[in-house]
Amino acid sequence: MKVLKRTLARMRNVVTRQSGDLRLREEMEDHLARETEAGMRAGMYAEAARREARLKFGGVESVREQYHAEEGLPLLENLMFDIRYGLRELRRSPAFAAVAVVTLMLGIGANIVVFGVVNAVLLHPLSVSDPQSLYQFVGRRWMSGGPSYPAFEDYRQRNSTFSGMAAEYGLSDAGLNWQKTVREVYGYDVSGNYFDVLGVQPELGRFFRPADEHGPDSAPYVVLGDALWRSAFGADRGVIGTTVDLNKHPFTVIGVAPPQFHGTERFLWPDYWIPMVNEEQVEGWDFLHSRLYTPIAVIGRLKPGVTPQQATENLNAIAANLAREYPATDKDDSARLIRPGLMGDERVVIRRFLYSVTALALLVLLAACANLASLFAARAADRSRELALRVALGSNRRRLARQLLTEAMLVALIGGAAGVGCAAFLLRAVQAWRPFPSGPEHLPVTVDARIYLAGLVLAIGSALLFRMIPARQAWQSHPLQAMKSGAAERFRLRRFALRDLLLGFQIATCTLLVTASLAAVRSMISALHAPLGIGPQGATLATMDLSQVGQTGGLALTKEKEMIEAAQSIPGVTAAGTVDYAPLSGAGMRGIPIYRPGTVEFRLDNEVTGARVYPISPAYLQAAGTRLLGGRNVLWQDTTKTPYVAVVNETFAHDMWGQKPAIGRHFILWSNLTTVVGVAENGKYGDLTESPQAAVYLPLPQCPQSNLALVVRSHVAETEMAAALQHTLGSIEPNVPITIQSWPAALSGVLLPARVATLALGIMGMLSAMLAVTGIFGMAAYSVSQRMKELAIRVALGAHRAQVMVAAVQRPLILLGVGSAIGLLAGVFASRFLGQIVYQARPGDPLVIGGAILAMMFLGVAASAIPARRALSADPSRLMREE
């Protein structure tokens, strides 16, 4: 208690130091006056008595310092003095302070933006109960997905390591009809125990449970997401118990999910959840009884004390038993457990990308610290006499180093605060950004306490990094040598060599990042010009789902024909056709087993290949710009009453029959013997980086679909065509939501990863280039300023302008060449690392290397131009007069 009171008293003395100093001065003056009076009474003259009193009292300043040490907090007072002194020094050099703060702001801001995304995507847990015990069950093969629904039921009943297993399917779109308004929404079909397994509690109402399910179509209930409840229902609490229509089927609203819960995927936020036993009402087909198709996502919660390895072994044993029991449909596909939230195996790709970008961002921050170390070293060199004089007058070297570190910490904290502020603004913009406004995609970025803590850590770490070298110089300085011009010059040159290394590191880092940026741009250009098998330019895409208004089968086929004919009648249209899902849309039938003629047992191990299947109208290939290489197209006359036919692509023909002609040959698809009537060119169907895929185009009358993408090719401007299509199609079916956009715009989702990677690397390269420019400029300017007298003498002795320029900026340009060479080599050797960010990044591409060399040459010339011009303008007579 006494220690606490003493500490509080000392803190009060620090706060009221000015008044305390006044009282101490009054007491000392009173004491000196009494001693002087006593001396005068003893017969001394007044001046002698005053001098004797001062000698007996001792040094006034030492008494004051002793008093402050005993009655105050010396560490706190010294820190406050260092801060005030550091702020004064920064005010004396506003240009230096601005450059240092902006440099740190850029470096720390870039890292905070990247960390904010990493924090939201990888570090932030899912909004469920005990997320650490939650795992997703997938097959052994990469991107193999989950089991079928009947297999999921077997796993759920037979496993002994999970306390619960839940299933989800989709994210499916549906038409929500509420108060005579139809809007497109996205939702999951989930098992009845879905919310119980996740441990989520409703915001309003209740969730459905296994007791609500009694077979197919037995639980017409829907749980709304918080966002849909607020946007479509106005946050009306009375919505519980009301009936809404999903694809023309009635569902009763029984609950609303909490606002922080968005399912088990971070990037896909559903609008609703319905029981999986009612999936046929929304999906239009039944996958609950088929073991062959439609893999579903399986989420399980481990029992207490069970390890993921034990659970995997248990699931593998069940998989082996199912393969023996159902050899026609179930393979012995060993199980893997992964963390849910990042679209299955895409988690690995996303993690690699984010961690790689984080490494590059840290590299930019290191370059910024090297830049600041150079600036502070130069500043310390300019202040060497001042620092030496302070040491000679008795200043403690530790105190001197602490003063320099305090200045660096002030710069770091100011720059860090500015960087965190800019980063928070950018992260909020990213959070509000919707890459596809009409879709369920979201970027779950938040600004929380971790962001600010990371900013503080980076600021302090940066200050220690870039102030370490100047502080070491001050610690090892020799006062007598520093105050002698010759010795000081030698000391300056020795530190100048260290600045060379720092600048070389900056240039190498800049070259590496510029090379990476150019490689990303080159990769994206190559992807854009890759053969797609379609011609997006000049085509408009109108997508809709007729099942949302209850039209399926023959009704949907009749409506589609009417829409195609209406689109073809629009002036300027050259071709119009439909497909269920356009290539590169991220949806559609894929991996459908294909069998040879004569196959009796349609088992997965008997299939020849797995193909993508596209039901199309006769004019689709022409409208899509897909070339027919041989044979004929599909026709409206190809119906279920005629032999089944198909157009296949080149990869399909090669997989089935090698180099033999494919037209006229047969294969089995969905138990139907199908004849090849045409061969089309290969294309890209899932993404731009996929290997060649087998594809089959079926006549729409033989495989009618409710979901359709109408492709319209014309010579009309995009906006005019979109308006004409909206009017034409809306008059045919006014109640179905229709999305109309140009086909290149529709492909933005496929190009989004490449664009994000290119943007990230471009920003890193730009920041690094700015640091390199400031570093080269700073070294060249400092070198010229220190050698102005020498350069002036050279001019006076008749040196040519070129010789003076070389002498002025030779060292920075040599470092530019050496650092650029090292950076180029690092970029070539880091191609595998860059491949984690950009697909097929080729830093060794001659165009990339040539572009990087030209960029670095431009940066070097731009940074050295002003110092070189100053060197050429040296006036010998003026400098000699000043000297």
Image (cartoon, rainbow, N blue to C red):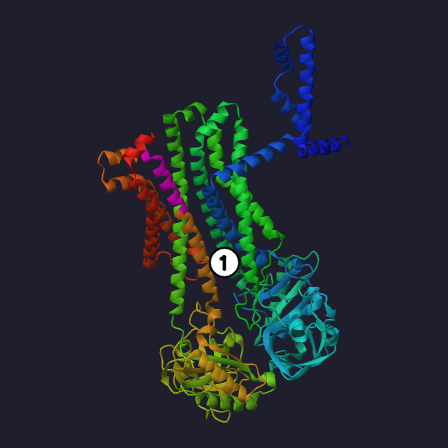
Q: Position of residue 535 (x, y in %)?
A: 40, 77
Amino acid on which disc 1 is placed: Phe
Give the residue displayed 31% in from the left and 30% down from the top: 881
Q: Estimate the x, y position of residue 346 in percent, counting from the top left.
A: 53, 64
Q: Dot 1: what SS?
A: helix
**Residue closest to the eye, 779 or 99:** 99
Q: For the C terminus, which image quadrant?
A: top left
Position of 33 with respect to 700 (left or right) is right
Does the image show residue 782?
Answer: yes
Q: How many discs appear?
A: 1
- The magenta-colored residue range is 774-789
In the rendered view, tell whether residue 769 sits above or below residue 94: below
Which of 280 and 22 lies nearest the eye of the viewer? 22
* Predominant SS of the magenta segment: helix
Q: Quadrant of the N terminus?
A: top right
Magenta segment: does it hold 585?
no
Q: Nearer the viewer, residue 192 or 357?
A: 357
Q: In which image quadrant can residue 855 be found?
A: bottom left
Q: Position of residue 687 (x, y in %)?
A: 46, 70
- Residue appearing at x 64%, y 24% in the figure: 64
Q: Is residue 782 magenta?
A: yes
